[in-house]
Image (spheres, rainbow, N blue to C red):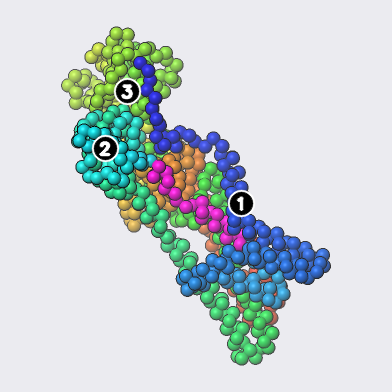
Amino acid sequence: MEAKAYLKPKEATAKTSGNPDPGGKHRRSFTRLLRHREMMMALGSGVMMLIGWIAGQWALPGWFSTGMYIAAYGLGGFTKARDGVATLLREKDLDVNLLMIAAAAGAAAIGYWNEGAMLIFIFALSGALESYASEQSKKDISALAALRPEVAVKIEDGVRREVRVEELEVGDLLLIRPDEVIPADGVIQNGDSYVNQASITGESVPVRKGRGDEVYAGTLNEDGALYVTVGSPAEGTLFAKIIRLVEQAEKETPKTQQFIKRLEGTYAKTVLAVTAALLLLSPVLLGWPWEQSFYKSMVFLVVASPCALVSSVMPVMLSAMSRSARRGVLFKAAASMDRLAGIKVAAFDKTGTLTLGNPVVTEMITLEGWDRTEVLAAAAAIEQWSRHPLARAVLAEAKKENLELPAAEDIQQLPGRGIQARIGGRTWIIEKANEQDLLFPDQLRGVIQGLTEQGNTVSTISCNGSYAAILGIRDEIRPEAREAISRLHRLGIKTIMLTGDRKVTADFIAAAAGIDEVYGDLLPEEKLERVKELGQRIGQVAMIGDGVNDAPALATASVGIAMGEGGSGAALDVADIVLMNGKLDKLADTMELAARARRVVMQNLIFAGSVILLLVTSNFIQDIPLPLGVIGHEGSTILVILNGLRLLR
């Protein structure tokens, strides 16, 4: 009998392909960064500033040096000026972008072109890096949409015809052939098959479905034809809900960003108001000459500009992100680093996250009179024609023991039970164990129950009607999972499991890993609601998952963390952080680094704010020279940047 060639769904491909060239990927990312439009303009601004400074040192014509500085202003300041004007016109509000441009223009107005150009360059460089990181963090749901078929086979008056999924109506009868993705939610009217529901429930093992059972759009029909009555239109399917939930979660603006935005506008308005008051009122109230008032106003505008404050955050976050990247943890946005420092709850998916996602044979108990090698070889000979995950586990066990497989004939699927075949004139059957079966030996019922309670899927192997062996197959816990959970506990973080798998399986894995709370039998939207509930009850939540079904929870959590090795494309796109090597032991390291980064940011903000306050006060109390003000301002900027760069080590 020839082995059937099966098409692999995209989800399975994503889980096995890995990353063959991680170094090349990082090089491509760096190249994309250099080619980023804002980055090119910022670097061009720095080059023009340097040329202008050299021209001044070499006593070249003044117009040449001034021209270079003007070019530096234009290249580095254009995007920021445009964004600032857009904010002013659209939101009727001032932001730091306009304040920085005004400060640089003020420096130029009193002849300090280089200082103004340096302000522009540093601010433009920081903005370019932030813009690039932000673009990388856009959550693309194309991987979700790609799993949904475009057409379905509709049966009408006994005639089959292909129609677009969008045209389906409630009550339509569909034919779903083997290896086809189910196009709509519905109920099976006829047929029997294994359905891979990993994209919806996260279950590691396909579920046997028959007449009267419900099926979901986006799941894979594996080995039998199904006739399904449509239960909801395309836009009402569970799969469509997942996509909408992700989109909705992506549009939510974090409260931290809203606070920073409000603070930025208030700061800019205050500085500009004080500058205007100093410029216009000091000649009247203080009797200063116009030249002195203008000079002090420009000094104030320069020293009060928030360059050091801006640099207090991004260099720290980018340094921490770079360090994490070297350790195999990718941050898509700097804001995720700050949010990670405040996490109180870590919620884990089970399959592929806490477990390896590859079921293995944990127990094989042969009954008296049977040889283990013979039974395992016969089971593998039959299962090699199946693509069920449990079958792959049996084959892997036989391969590990280097067994030679006998020839299997008359292979038949047993709907709802298992598979059978003839080997050497004897009939072998592999089927799901049922401890309630009256033919089962009493002494084995307890063994089956024990294996089940340990999270195993239990199967029996029989020959010519006599039981030969019992198989226990389980998705094994990751070897580093328990230590990773223990370290999170030491950091004061509560751990939760959210899974679509059976509660009994989830309880066993949770106990083995040391998880605090377990929630099983969850659909994707229920995972999302549970994440929201945890956030309200305990605090900020980090969701760690790897599948399409985890996407809504990943998107709505305070921080979404995806498993890069074996994770689905949708999970990777939606997540804020990606564990590129899929190792859970990096979680605690990353959270500790995030907490350290937050402390460094606070140090920088306090220092930068103190310097600005000192310079502003000095400008009012006595005549502080502009060069000294620029040195103090730029010096504080350099110091906070160097303080942030310490995190690279």
- The amino acid sitting under disc 2 is Lys
Name the N-terminal-most of marks 1 and 2: 1
Magenta stretch bounds? 123-146
Mark yes or no: residue 138 visible: yes
Q: Secondary structure at mark 2?
A: strand
Q: Is residue 367 above or below residue 515?
A: above
Is residue 127 on the magenta stretch?
Answer: yes
Q: Nearer the viewer, mark 3 or mark 1?
A: 1
Q: Is residue 222 above or below residue 26?
A: above
Dominant secondary structure (helix, strand or loop) of the stretch shown in magenta: helix
Q: Mark on residue 471? A: 3
* Relative side of 532 to 60, left or right: left
* Relative side of 589 to 622, left or right: left
> In the depicted view, which residue is nearer to us: 310 or 611?
310
Q: Mark on residue 426? A: none
- Which residue is identified by label 1? 35
> In the depicted view, which residue is nearer to us: 469 or 63?
63
Q: CA distance from mark 3 to mark 1?
A: 56 Å
